[in-house]
Image (cartoon, rainbow, N blue to C red):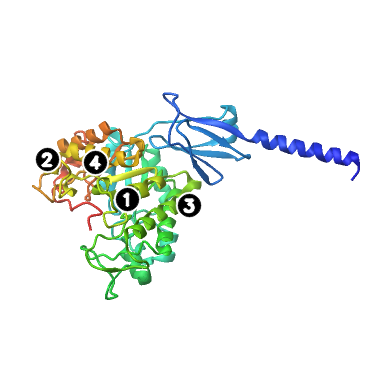
Amino acid sequence: MSLRHAIAALAGLGILLSAAAAAAMDGRVLDAVTGAAVPDAIVTVQGIATRLQPTGAFHVDGAPDRILVRAPGYRATAVAAADLARTGGTVRLAPFTPKAVYLTVYGIGSKTLRDGALRLVKQGTVNALVIDLKGDRGIVPYPSPTAQATAPQARQLTTISDLAALARTLHANGVYLIARIVTFKDAPLAAAHPEFAIHTASGALFHDREGLAWTDPFRPEVQAYNIGLAIEAARAGFDEVQFDYLRFPDSSTKLRLAKPSNLGNRTQAIAGFLAEARRRLAPYNVFLSADVFGYVCWNLDDTGIGQRLGDIMPSVDYLSPMLYPSGFRFGIPGIENPVANSYSIVRDSLAQARARVNVSPKRFRPWLQAFRDYAFDRRLFDADEVADQIRAANDFGSDGWMLWNARNTYADTGLAQDDAGASKLASAASGSPPPHSCS
């Protein structure tokens, strides 16, 4: 190579290096209202997610078309590279606090129940819906390629004909969408693939107190199936994926699983599943949440089911403990009658959980009770009881709350404002069955 060509080559290399350096950018994630740094923000670049330091500072290498940003307590956003350069690397997130009610596989398909929930949105008392995309009986209510390929029995009922169209319609109504996926309690998958199921010591399929089969959390095929459904929800436009029944069954019967069942193996299986789900969902910038038993906030072990706060929290944006007073059959320290102390059950459990994992209160969003007590005095959890629980969550500083009613009727909660149609439905709510995750 001549000297002239060598100089030209070095000059070209210098241009490339300068361009690469110019493509790198330092920035900060700020609150759009206060201008304060946003702690716990996550910046995703080309499918790789990074949780930021409390200062909200980030560094981007290369020249991505856009960066994805989200943080608990805020709306997620995507920022084009040109816009990022124009703002000097500043990303402003809009604060958001979800206030949600729940719709089952059947509820989302019922015009009466769906419209009742949307009336609450229109009135401004709720702004989010938790919708079953795999329900308690393993039903997947929309045309799912993942379910069709792996567990066709799960597709026996269609109440959502077009998942993406549903998401667009609900977003147009100002709704934050949470996809609830019942994870390891899954009778259709167990029936389609008994080799993925939990068995008794005799080799028979294990069935819980509802007569439903469970799949084995140790099996990678089971984990992949549920993550596949989560990806479908994210692609359709849901804002958040929430895994429920994220656990081993609470059974006194000796069970046969793919690995020995002990505290270390169980917690590793649940934490490993969440870590993989988080990795696979990163390109979609969707929030990830996990439901846990209320007593998990208090217990130091895994409650025998694989749920331990310190193992779960690192992989989720939100932890959603089920803080139904009726579910605290043995009380908590200082409280023997939980249903007479709804405020304290919610507030004290959240405070206990936060003290254990040392994170922002915005990393929590609890499930609250909107159904008749089944464990103590059969009281109806009406407007006063629901208001006490909501006040406790607000006083703690959680990022909102979610109301559970298996019948999807919320007139007795005090959220409805002179809604005659919802009041008529309320008479059916008095017989609401017990909540999720109790079998």
- Which is more N-terminal, label 4 or label 3? 3
Label placed on residue 276: none
Of marks 2 and 1, the one in the foreground? 1
Of marks 1 and 3, the one in the foreground? 1
Label placed on residue 340: 2
Residue 325 image offset from top left, x and y in percent: 17, 44
Q: Please report contact status of discs 2 and 4: CB closer than 8 Å, yes or no.
A: no
Q: Residue at x 21, y 50 (%)?
A: 407
Residue furthest right in the image:
2
Q: Nearer the viewer, residue 32 or 177?
A: 32
Amino acid found under the numbered disc labelled 3: Arg
Which residue carries the number 4 mark?
349
Which residue carries the number 1 mark?
308
Amino acid found under the numbered disc labelled 2: Ala
- Which is more N-terminal, label 1 or label 2? 1
Which element is circle 1 on? loop
Q: Measure the alpha-carbon separation of dots 2 and 1.
A: 27 Å
- Label 1: few (<14), some (14–19) or many (≥20) C-alpha neighbours in 10 Å: many
Q: Nearer the viewer, residue 167 or 228?
A: 228
Q: Please report contact status of discs 1 and 4: CB closer than 8 Å, yes or no.
A: no
Which element is circle 4 on? helix
Which residue carries the number 3 mark?
280
Quadrant including the C terminus = bottom left
Residue 33 image offset from top left, x and y in percent: 42, 25
Which element is circle 2 on? helix
Which element is circle 3 on? helix
Residue 154 image offset from top left, x and y in percent: 35, 63
- Which is more N-terminal, label 4 or label 1? 1
Q: Measure the alpha-carbon separation of dots 3 and 4.
A: 31 Å
Q: Measure the alpha-carbon separation of dots 2 and 3.
A: 43 Å
- Residue 193 appears left or right of 209: right
Q: Please report contact status of discs 1 and 3: CB closer than 8 Å, yes or no.
A: no
